[in-house]
Each structure stands twice: as structure tokens, then as C-alpha cells.
Amino acid sequence: MSKTERIEIEPLARVEGHGGIRVEIKDNKVQNVEVRILEGPRLFETLVLGKTPEEDLSIVPRICAICNLSHKFAALRGLEKALGVTVPEATQLYRELMHHGEMLESHSLHLYFLALPDFLGYDNAIAMAEKYGDVVTKALALKKFANKVMRIMGGRMIHGENPILGGFGRLPDHRTLQQLREEAEGFLPFAMETIDLLASLEVPDYMERETRFLCLKPPHDGYGYYGDILLASDGKEYDVEDYKSVISERVVGHSFAKRGRYQDRPFTVGAIARVLNLGDRLTGKAREARDRLVNERWYRNPLYNNFAQAVEMVFSLEDMVRVIDRLLELDQPEIARPTRETGVGTGGVEAPRGILLHHYEIENGLTVSADIITPTAMFLDDVEAFIRRASESLLSKNELDNFELRLEMVARAFDPCISCSTHLVTVEFE
Amino acid sequence: MSGTKTTTSGGESKGRERPRLGIYGLTGCAGDQLLLIHTEDHLLDIFEAFDVRSFVMASSNPVEEELDVAIVEGSVSTEEQREHLLEIRKRAKILVAAGNCATAGGVQAMYAKDGSFAERMRRVYGDDVKFVTEPIEGSPLDEFVTVDYYLPGCPISQSQVLALLSRLLHGEQPEPYPHPVCHECKLRENRCLLLDKKFCLGPVTLGGCGAACPSNGVGCTGCWGPNPDGNFEEHFKLLQSFGMSKDEIIRRVRNYGGHKILQYIKDLE
Ligand code: SF4
Ligand code: SF4
């Protein structure tokens, strides 16, 4: 191996857009690891200044298409807190239904089409289909179903305006709900087959190192994707309103995405963080799935994030059934109205890739300050740390075959959006 | 051409070269590309009918050579992207701007040309960061290159992009779609929101979405960009009669109007 080597993983086509990974190696030592986010700046925090909450809700989901409804949900939670809006139970449940749609859509795309081919040794899902045709066909159907839920609740496939402050523009009728319920139940056996498939896989360990996990604690005894308390794997809990003192943000020159740290160290968010921190709250088939898959290596190995996504798909399908059963008993909710025009609020939602925080300050009905922290910003430092660890251990064992692919697998495990995961490594020898 | 795929899928030659297609993303949310991926069944048709050379979001191993058609999503927001766009333009016979970011600049261009960009950069990133590529205020593609066809919308509509692609596939000119959102709203037999004195930009916004928002009882925010035939002056007067100030109306129409709205409101402010 030459003295100085630079490994470029570029384009990391979509880590919220354009980016790449650069690893610099000198005399067999890793000098520097950078996850470079080269997507241009959009300055969302300044775009909402002077705007009404209604405009904020329309603008902020444009941050990310894949997580557009998570952004909508987080913004709704933040703005409703600020303006003293209390939504009825049915509205809350419709939002959960909407969010399950996004979770299933994102997880199925990532797990079946981007990660599984790696684990099974194929270049892509199409090549994988020759031996696993049944899995690919069912996965496509599951993704389509999830898209439908997003379209019905969001109002459009992407960037729908149907969710509004205090409620929804239009709600599905009971027949539509019944159909969704049936379909969700129908996909459960497939989701459990996926758990079996994953249980049979060998997971490599070349990147393993200790880290910490953060997620939101649901405001009830169950598992869930939103909350007002930040829960860390060290057992500590924090009010989400204090997020600034818990997660410190810094700006680095190689990235237009800011970086977050917990107690001055990198941390992980996302499905793996939720299943590790909240898994004891799971019931039913999801509990079976988690008991089957989780082991102590999860705490050191981000590749298990894909396994955690499979557990959450089971949870989301089961919970959709519960949510719809309850909705069928409830009357159509009224739109809840603001009780004040001035206030401050932080909305916390678990996006597919982890904690998403939206903080708003509203004065006389207009936005005077906003702060948005995305999961990608939170876990980028940890991705760098795991890639560094992976490079070091592969170098020390002199395992140089598929070096880039193995680094890429680590980045892909975090689910940094679609195309970064499709494929991107080139090596440059200096 | 060595190493590239030149046969149709299944190995059958159609006797005619398939047009070479490249799909690219600059700065945006990738919603327009994602929408194409969500067309699952049609996506396969696209891959069959076109020789898809580059679509990094959906497929690995791009081949960056001459193209018959390039579809570009996103605004130009860094110097590197400006260079990338010029390079794509050189290689592509036909260039299509897809999505509001590419056609108008996107939400990141709502303050287009008001001179606040540097200050807003400072506000978000602080004073002393030097980025690896120079940031540019979000701009539509046609600020830098000639654009042959526009697919507006945030994101684009599946039917509009498929119609454009099939026209291009047969060597025909894609047709413009000069109808406002109102037109589609009437076809869906919705009750007009303006009758209830609700804010809606339908009359001054280009259609194509099937009146998605008014069909849910929610006003149009204008995400398709301005309808050139729209009577902005009269519509603003109507909205003012609902108790909205002119400043607020102009502010709202700029949210998705980017660079393209400026000519329609310059005498109204
Ligand atoms: S036009 Fe809209 S959907 Fe397309 S990239 Fe821009 S923000 Fe996303
Ligand atoms: S109704 Fe207006 S805001 Fe809604 S999708 Fe259509 S153009 Fe966009």
C-alpha cells in the first residue's frame, strides 16, 4: 500500500443531497475521516422568519422529501405547543397513522432495496431478485402500501398540505380505514418472515466500538415515535425544551449540515437507538421479533440498525391495526384552535432516521425564531467515528479487499437517505 | 461506448438506439427524483424505453457521457453545482428543469435578489466558516444555462413527467400546459375556497397537480409557480378584501415564486 492514500466515497449521492466520504491514510494510519455534505445551503431557519405558522408548515417539509411528513409532524408539535393548541385523541391517532406510513415507506426502501443486497452479497435488489424474487416482490408491495398511507393522510405523495395546525384538511372515510387495516394485517406475515431471514445472517464486526444512543421517550407506556423527553442509553432523561444543553451543535467546513454531540461525544439515533432504549415496551409480534434479534453486539455495531428497522416494521403494522380500531370507534375530530398568539415550543418526533427537533418562537402570530435539528446532523459525527474504526481495524488486519464497499456499508447502515446508499465509492491513489 | 449497456433489457435489440437519459440532483429535497422512484411500474418502463446513463439516486455506476435528454432537479446553490450544470448542458441535447427548485429556485429562493443572502448565511453558520465550495444564493437553472423544457411543481407531477418523456421518446415536442390550478379544481367539482373567503393562490398558479390542496379543503400555496395569464392585480385585491394586507399576500406569493414571480409583482408592491 502506498504511503499516502486517499479514499474517496463520492458522490455520496444523497445524504440529504450531495456529499461523500473521504478517508486519508498515511503509513497505514488513518489520518482523517470526513463525511462531506456538499449539498448547497438552503437556510430554512431564515426562510420561516416573519411567517405565519401556516406558512411554516408548508415550507419546512421541503427540507427532505423522504422524511417530509416527519418534518410536518415535528413542526406541528412545536407550533401547537407554542400556540397552546391541544388536539383531540382522534387527531393524534390520525397523525400516528400518517407517521406509520412514512416509517414503513422509508424502512422498507432502505432495508430491502439498499441494505439487504449488501448482506446477501448482491450488487442491487434486481440482482437479488433472481434468488429472492418473492422477497423483492412483497417488499415492493409493502412500499406501495406505505406510499398510499402517506398519500391519503398527507394529501399528496410528497409535500401534501393536508395536515394543518390542529387537525387535517380532509380525513379518510371508514371504508378506507377498514381497507388500510386489512392490508396492514396482510403484510404482517411477510414482516415476520423478514425477521427470520435476518436472524440467519452473519453480521461482520470490523467496525465495532462503543457508542451512546438517544431517542424520544413516548408519553405513554408503549413504544412510539414521538415524545417530549430525550432518553439516553446511559439512563439519563432530559426535557426536550432543554435540547440545546443536551445536544451541542457545531459547524464544520466540509459540511453544510451541522454536527451534533451528546456530552461532547458522538452518538447514534434512529431505529437501533429506539429499539435498544425502548424495546422493553414492545408487545405482540414486535416483541417476539426484538427478542429474537437483539443481542449485546447491537450496542457496538451500527449494521444492526437494519435489523431494528425490521422490528419497527412489525411494530408499525401492528400499531396501525390498533390505531385504526380505535379510530373506528371515535367521531371525526374538530380542528383545534390556538389559544394564544405568542409562545415558544419544541416539537420532537422520531423520523425514520432518528430524533427530529423543530423549535419555534412565535410573537403575535408570526415566527421570530426557528431552529431545526435533523437526525443526519446528530449522527454524522458517529458515522465518521465508525468509519474511522472500520478503516483502522481493516488496515491492522491487512484486509484490503472490498475496503470501500465495507466502509460504505457502515455509512449505509445509518440510512443517510437513498442514493448515498445506492453506491458511491471510488478510490484515489496519490 | 465500451463497457456501457447498449441493448434493451432482456437482450433484445429494438433496431433503434434508445435515447440516452441522465437524471441529476442539485440543491433541493430530492422530492422530484423520489417521485420518479415512487412510480415503480413506470420506472421500469422508463428504464426500458430510455438508456438511463446516470440516475445516482436509483442506480449505481453512472456513465457520464453524451446525453439525448438530461433532467435536472434542484437549484444551483454552490459554485461546484454551477460548474456541474454547465458540464451537463454541454453533454445534453435537451435539458429539462424538473421541480420548483430548478424552474424557479425553490423555497430557498423566496428572497431572490433582495440582498439578504450573506446576512442569512452568517445567521445560520456563523462568521468564520470557510466551506469547501463557495455557496450561491439558490437560483433556477436558466440563470446559468438554456433550459429547453420546464416541469414545474414542488414536487413535479407523475403524469406531467411521463407525458413529457413519452413525447421526447417519439421525437415530438412536449406540449405546454398553460392552465391554472382553478381549472383543475373546477374539473374536480370542488367548492371554491374563495367563496368562503379562504386564502388560495389557485387563480394565479400554474396547474398540473390536479388541484391537490383545494381538493382537501386547503388553499393553494402556489407551489407550481406563477400562471403567466393570471390577473395578479385583481386577485390580490380580492384577497385584500378578506382582510389580508398586501404585504402578506406578496410575501406568501413569493414563498414558492422564486425568481419567476418577480416580473408579475414588480408593479404591485
Ligand atoms: S422542487 Fe420541491 S420537491 Fe423538488 S427538490 Fe425542490 S423542494 Fe424538493
Ligand atoms: S394546489 Fe397549489 S400548492 Fe397545492 S400542489 Fe397544487 S400548485 Fe401546489
Image (tube, grey):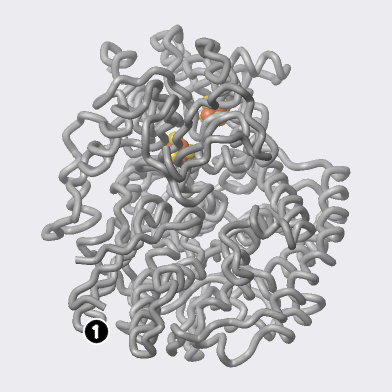
Give me the residue at 56% from left, 85% from top: A298
Residue positioned most to the front: B2
Classify A190 as above or below A393: above
Seen in the image, is A320 located left or right of residue B168? right
Q: Toward the viewer: A156 or A344? A: A156
Q: Chain of mark 1?
A: A
- Does the image show residue A87? no
Classify A423 as above or below B229: below
Q: Toward the viewer: A42 or B16? A: B16
Amino acid type assigned to the residue bearing label 1 in the image: Lys
Judging from the image, what secondary structure is the residue with disc 1 in? strand
Classify A18 as above or below B260: below
Q: Quadrant of residue A343?
A: bottom left
Q: Which class describes the residues within 10 Å of circle 1: few (<14), some (14-19), or many (20+)?
A: some
Which residue corresponds to mark 1?
A29
Q: Toward the viewer: A284 or B90? A: B90
Q: Quadrant of residue A309?
A: bottom right
Q: Position of residue B138 (x, y in %)?
A: 28, 37
Q: How many marks?
A: 1
